[in-house]
Image (tube, helix red, strand yellow):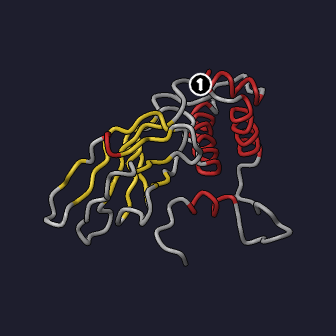
Amino acid sequence: MAYTIVTGPASEPLTLTEVKLHLRVDHSSDDNLITMLIQAAREYVEQTTGRALLSQTIREYWDDFPTCCTLDLALSPLTSVTNFQYIDEDGATQTISGSNYTADTVSKPARIVKRDDYTWPTVDDVPNAVWVTYVAGAANAGALDASLKQAMLLQIGYWYENREDMPVNETNNPRIRSAGWILEKYKTAWI
């Protein structure tokens, strides 16, 4: 399973003004840095929790349908499914009707559940032959839990005050550094 962000959030959960107030910054010379830290903190919280904080469109891929009836989605909370598609044995793209599955918007992780009377179709033997495009995340920053915003503020404050790379947990593994954590999400193979 892999996913891509098709359309990111239209805004961030925290405004520059809110973050500068938290940091006690009253000048504009660090505005670009702080703006970058806001986005990085949102991505950190999303990657750590499996939650899309604000509404965004995601496309998630699988090589085949599951042996059972459920596809777990990477990001919650699920708002809606835009489309559910696959590549058939002839190499053509097909769309699965919404009447053949239920989009579970309550569970975390969010999931797509096949109807009992429906059988998954056979897919072409190619990578990423099945994909779901969906919308996940809160409609606006006001709908987010305050603790998620606070986690962002704490992370931003830490990064703002500690601009050099440093061990994440020196006692357990001094080789894991903050830059290494950032690079984990871009890793293409397990080395």
The residue where tag 1 is placed is 141
10 to the left or right of 164: left
Disc 1 secondary structure class: helix
83 to the left or right of 35: left
How many discs mark residues in the rendered view? Answer: 1
Q: Within 10 angstroms of label 1, few (less than 14), some, or many (20 or more) residues?
A: some
Q: Residue at 54% of width from left, 29% of height from top?
A: 138
**Which image quarter: residue 43?**
top right
Q: Residue at 33% of width from left, 38% of height from top?
A: 82
Q: Residue at 69% of width from left, 30% of height from top?
A: 145
Query: Where is residue 93 drawn, in percent x and y?
Result: 19, 54
Q: Is residue 188 above or below residue 53?
A: below
**Which image quarter: residue 17?**
top right
Q: Is 151 in front, or is 103?
A: 103
Locate the N terminus by quadrant. Answer: bottom left
Q: Is 27 in front, or is 175?
A: 175
Locate the C terminus by quadrant. Answer: bottom right
Q: Residue furthest front?
A: 117
33 to the left or right of 168: left
Query: Where is residue 97 drawn, in percent x and y?
Result: 27, 43
| Callout 1 amino acid | Ala
Q: Residue at 49% of width from left, 38% of height from top?
A: 78
Query: Where is residue 20 drawn, in percent x and y?
Result: 70, 26
Q: Is 20 in front, or is 48?
A: 48
